[in-house]
C-alpha cells in the first residue's frame, strides 16, 4: 500500500510553476517515512511534520467537540507552527 501511495503522490504545483520549493515540499515523503516507522528519515525530510500533524489533529478534534479547546491556545499553537514552518523554509532556501 505504501508503495502505491508513494507512486501516486501529488506533484507540487508551486514548484512546477515557480521552480522553487514550497513551504510544505517534502511533507508527503516525510509522512510516508513516518507511516513506515522511519522517524529519523521523516525528520530529515521535513522537520516540522509532527507539529503540523498535531495542529491538524487539534483543529479536527476542536471541530468535532465544538470548540472545547481554549481558542487563544489553539491560535498561539498555530502561530508557533507557522513560525516553525517559515524558519524551516528559510533554512531550506538558504541551503540550496
Image: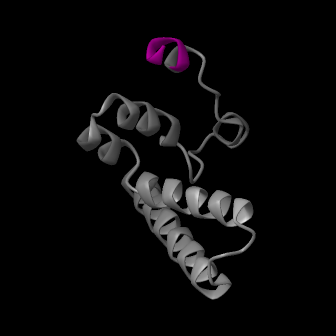
Identify the residue shown where x is 60% and y is 49%: 22
Residue 38 location (% of width, % of height): 27, 34
Measured from the top left, where is residue 15 in percent x and y? 64, 39
Q: Which residues are magenta?
A: 1-5
Q: Position of residue 8 (x, y in %)?
A: 60, 17
- Say if 72 sits above or below 28 in the image: below
Compared to residue 4, the image places residue 47 above or below, namely: below
Q: Measured along the vertical axis of the image, is residue 36 above or below residue 58?
A: above
Where residue 83 sits in the image (x, y, percent)? 51, 73
Observer-nearest residue: 66 or 43? 66
- Which residue is painted at 37% across and 42% down in the image? 45
- What is the count of numbered marks? 0
Please tell me which residue is depicted at 73% across the width and 38% down the height of the picture. 17
Q: Is residue 64 above or below residue 35?
A: below
The question of residue 57 being in magenta is answered with no
Q: Residue at x 48, y 40 (%)?
A: 26
The figure's colour scheme reads one colour
Considering the whole magenta stretch, tell me its main secondary structure.
Answer: helix
Instruction: Answer left or right for 52 relative to 72.
Output: left
Q: Nearer the viewer, residue 60 or 80?
A: 60
Query: Residue extending furthest bottom?
Result: 72
Is residue 4 located in the magenta-colored stretch of the structure?
Answer: yes
Nearer to us in this view, 93 or 48: 48
Amino acid at each position: 500500500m505504501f508503495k502505491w501511495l508513494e507512486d501516486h503522490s501529488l506533484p507540487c504545483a508551486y514548484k512546477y510553476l515557480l521552480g522553487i520549493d514550497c513551504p510544505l515540499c517534502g511533507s508527503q515523503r516525510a509522512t510516508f517515512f513516518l507511516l513506515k516507522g522511519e522517524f529519523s528519515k521523516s525528520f530529515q525530510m521535513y522537520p516540522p511534520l509532527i507539529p503540523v500533524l498535531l495542529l491538524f489533529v487539534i483543529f479536527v478534534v476542536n471541530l468535532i467537540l465544538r470548540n472545547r479547546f481554549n481558542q487563544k491556545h489553539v491560535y498561539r499553537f498555530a502561530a508557533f507552527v507557522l513560525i516553525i514552518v517559515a524558519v524551516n523554509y528559510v533554512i531550506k532556501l538558504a541551503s540550496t
